Amino acid sequence: MPQKSPLIAIYPGSFDPLTLGHLNIIQRSLKLFDSLVVAIVVNPNKQSLFSLEERRAMIEEALGKDRKRVRVDSFSGLLVDYVRAQNARAIIRGLRAVSDFEYEFQMAHMNRSLYPDVETIFMMAGEDHFYVSSRLVREVASLGGDVSPMTPPNVHRALLARFPRKEKP
Ligand code: PNS
């Protein structure tokens, strides 16, 4: 009997840094796909808080037991070219608020027109994570707020090292 090729999905993003919302999407994607590639976009025009290597290492550490079926990689250029090269069947994106929808809708259609064989699968953010974004996590951490409920412990430690919290008077 011919061997079925494994179902691979790509979960692209900036992951600057990884949040518990991302981790939730990764865990749920693994119920649908044999393996997942977390693909960190390399965008020289966008300044990031953490370097590519730091983000990759943080994601790998946070994956824990899921590490066996998840590969952390980076890509530059068009996402669909990367998806094709990886022989992947789907792009995974998390959807939080309605405000995410327009941008995600445009990207999904653009990607499908560039590469008709790819499907974008949207996952609704878990109810504990619908307000969590990397941008807000960075902002709150930089201002001394507690982001431990929204980040894996190793990411929280990295944020504390970057933005030491001052003692409140
Ligand atoms: O986590 P983000 O920043 O929302 O992720 C955005 C990402 C990486 C999915 C998007 O910027 C992307 O796909 N970039 C690669 C370049 C590309 O293919 N652009 C056309 C998208 S339609």
Image: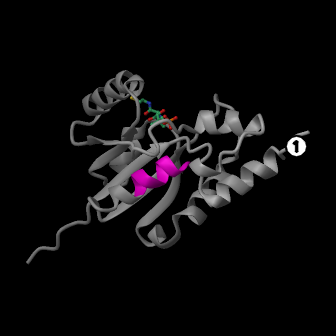
| Color theme of the render | one colour
- Res. 46 visible in picture: yes
Residue type highlighted by circle 1: Lys
Please give left or right for residue 37 compared with residue 3 in the image: right
- The picture places residue 35, in percent across and down from the top left corner, at 35, 63
- Residue at the location (38% across, 41% down)? 93
Where is the N terminus found, in terms of image quarters? Answer: bottom left
Residue 20 inside the magenta-drawn segment: yes
The span shown in magenta is 18-26
In this picture, is 54 found above or below 47? below
- The picture places residue 88, in percent across and down from the top left corner, at 31, 53
- The picture places residue 148, in percent across and down from the top left corner, at 65, 51
| Closer-to-camera residue (158/4) | 158
- Residue at the location (29% across, 47% down)? 90
- Residue at the location (31% across, 26% down)? 105
| Closer-to-camera residue (111/121) | 121
Mark 1: few, some, or many residues within 10 Å (few <14, many ≥20)? Answer: few
Please give left or right for residue 148 compared with residue 101 in the image: right
Report the residue that reaches farthest toward the left.
Answer: 1
